[in-house]
Image: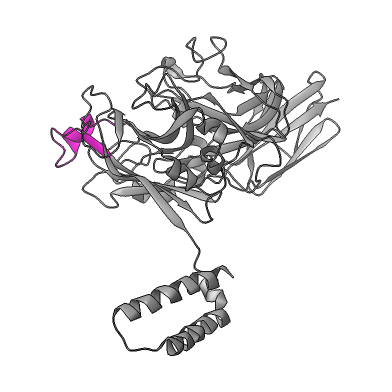
């Protein structure tokens, strides 16, 4: 009946407008006209309902970003309500009305316009928890939550398309903005972060000589439901926020801040849950970087995630073809080359695509008791050739004290895997729509124990010690299936 409610509002507006124009229409005649219009719409209600109800909020509109290494902050005093921490990090304080606006059916669209950076760069949207009443803040001294991440394409601003859009389903973000436990203690600031440098474009792109502007960015939220109610039922705890490249190391195997143990790509993150929850999850955003020769950008690795010592997720980033994004990469580059590449090539070489969104992964935890908890990420095969590159990791905890979190939220780049696996005795069998090209096996604690490019129906665990193993099957489409197997 919602469309009839909207129509009745329209009827009243129409009646007032006609009367204001001094048209000589009697009230009863007007009533008959409007009733007839209402009936006509009711009869064809399906066509009205097809027009989805939505509303939007655009906190950043074509904000221009500048050289990320330049210490001079450009547009700092523009007076547009944006706090510019650096040329690569902008923030806008949310009012109570801004936060009350959000529903629980939220979509995010980020639009990046090409200026004078013609390389692929990392960008993200964050929420900062800032002491109440502060007019500014140090981003590295407050708690922050990354909600989405993206990679820009190689763009020549003189070619088309000269912009790229990233779209996300972000329904659970609404819980964050309506959490009065947070709002009572903090002001929430939206951050738009996009690091770029103009040095190559200054020489390679017509019209960029001497310029410092690198990209322009727009952030838009759309809700297809009514504003949600403010609540104290949510429990949200920031765990870790990625560092930008000018601020230090993220997850790696060669720096004390990047790993638990030098030589292994393993990092443990601890957090305190203040209250018991009936349902919960960890939200993880992570991407692989290192563009040097044999760098981690080009090598797909198995990722293991443990919660309180138990594995809760295994995944191998990438595996999708980047050809659908080729047209967005208007600047020639070594990733795409001059001609189309096969799906098999992409499957072996890409962790992400320039011009694509980075997956947001939801790791379900269920009910949890209050107290100390830890989450550990392992990437056992990561090499970091020449001590370069890292894996920027952002995570936050989200739970409810009563009820369950919605289950319909999916990863941004989730895809079906055409591999099925089952175990019989100590043999693990795999069936795949495409040929299996590689098998690798890890112990439960993440140690690599076996790998082969030869596979025929099954892999035997008879030669291993009794215990639990992680068996990974790769097919020539780049799809990966990881299963737990028991050596009895």
356 vs 464: above or below: below
| Magenta-span inclusion, residue 210 | yes
**Residue 142 lies in quadrant:** top left
Magenta highlight on residue 218: no
Coloration of the structure image: one colour
Q: Residue furthest front?
A: 27
* Residue occupying the point 49% across, 68% down: 51
Up the image or down, 142 lies above or below 90; here it is above
Quarter of the image containing the C terminus?
top right
Quarter of the image for the N terminus: give it. Answer: bottom right
Residue 350 visible, this angle: no
Numbered-mark total: 0
Residue 300 % position (x, y) = 53, 31
Q: Percent x, y for residue 481?
A: 66, 38
Q: Nearer the viewer, residue 419 or 379?
A: 379
**What are the residue bounds of the magenta stretch?**
196-215
Vertical comparison of 259 with 238: above or below: above
Nearest the viewer among 460 and 470 is 470
């Amino acid at each position: 009946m919602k469309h009839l409610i909207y129509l009745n509002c329209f009827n009243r507006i129409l009646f007032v407008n006609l009367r204001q124009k001094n048209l000589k229409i009697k009230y009863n005649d007007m009533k008959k006209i409007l009733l007839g219009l209402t009936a006509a719409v009711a009869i064809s209600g399906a066509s009205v309902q097809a027009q989805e109800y939505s509303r939007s909020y655009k906190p950043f509109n074509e904000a221009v970003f500048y050289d990320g290494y330049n210490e001079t902050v450009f547009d700092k005093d523009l007076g547009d309500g944006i706090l510019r921490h650096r040329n690569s990090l902008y923030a806008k304080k949310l009012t109570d009305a801004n936060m009350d606006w959000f529903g629980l059916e939220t979509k995010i669209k980020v639009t990046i316009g090409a200026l004078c950076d013609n390389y692929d760069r990392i960008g993200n949207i964050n929420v900062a928890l800032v002491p109440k009443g502060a007019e500014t803040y140090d981003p590295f001294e407050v708690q922050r939550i990354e909600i989405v991440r993206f990679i820009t394409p190689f763009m020549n601003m003189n070619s088309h398309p000269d912009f790229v859009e990233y779209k996300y389903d972000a329904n659970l973000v609404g819980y964050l903005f309506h959490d009065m436990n947070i709002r009572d203690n903090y002001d929430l600031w939206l951050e738009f972060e996009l690091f770029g440098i103009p040095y190559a474009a200054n020489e390679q792109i017509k019209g960029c000589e001497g310029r410092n502007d690198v990209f322009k960015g727009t952030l838009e939220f759309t809700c297809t439901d009514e504003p949600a109610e403010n609540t104290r039922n949510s429990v949200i705890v920031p765990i870790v926020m990625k560092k930008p490249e000018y601020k230090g190391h993220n997850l790696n195997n060669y720096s004390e801040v990047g790993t638990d143990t030098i030589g292994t790509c393993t990092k443990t993150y601890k957090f305190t849950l203040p209250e018991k929850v009936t349902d919960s999850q960890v939200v993880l955003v992570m991407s692989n970087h290192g563009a040097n020769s044999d760098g981690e950008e080009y090598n797909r690795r198995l990722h293991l995630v443990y919660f309180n010592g138990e594995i809760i997720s295994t995944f191998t980033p990438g595996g999708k073809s980047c050809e659908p994004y080729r047209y967005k990469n208007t600047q020639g580059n070594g990733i795409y080359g001059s001609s189309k590449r096969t799906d098999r090539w992409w499957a072996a070489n890409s962790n992400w695509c320039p011009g694509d969104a980075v997956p947001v992964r939801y790791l379900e935890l269920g009910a949890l008791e209050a107290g100390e908890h830890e989450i550990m990420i392992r990437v056992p095969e990561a090499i970091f050739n020449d001590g370069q590159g890292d894996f920027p990791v952002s995570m936050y905890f989200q739970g409810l004290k009563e009820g369950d979190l919605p289950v319909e939220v999916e990863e941004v780049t989730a895809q079906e895997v055409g591999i099925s696996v089952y175990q019989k005795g100590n043999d693990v069998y795999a069936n795949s729509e495409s040929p299996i090209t590689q098998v690798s096996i890890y112990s439960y604690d993440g140690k690599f124990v076996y790998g082969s490019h030869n596979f025929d129906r099954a892999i035997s665990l008879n030669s291993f010690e009794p215990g639990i193993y992680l068996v990974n099957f790769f097919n020539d489409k780049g799809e990966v299936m990881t299963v737990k197997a028991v050596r009895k």
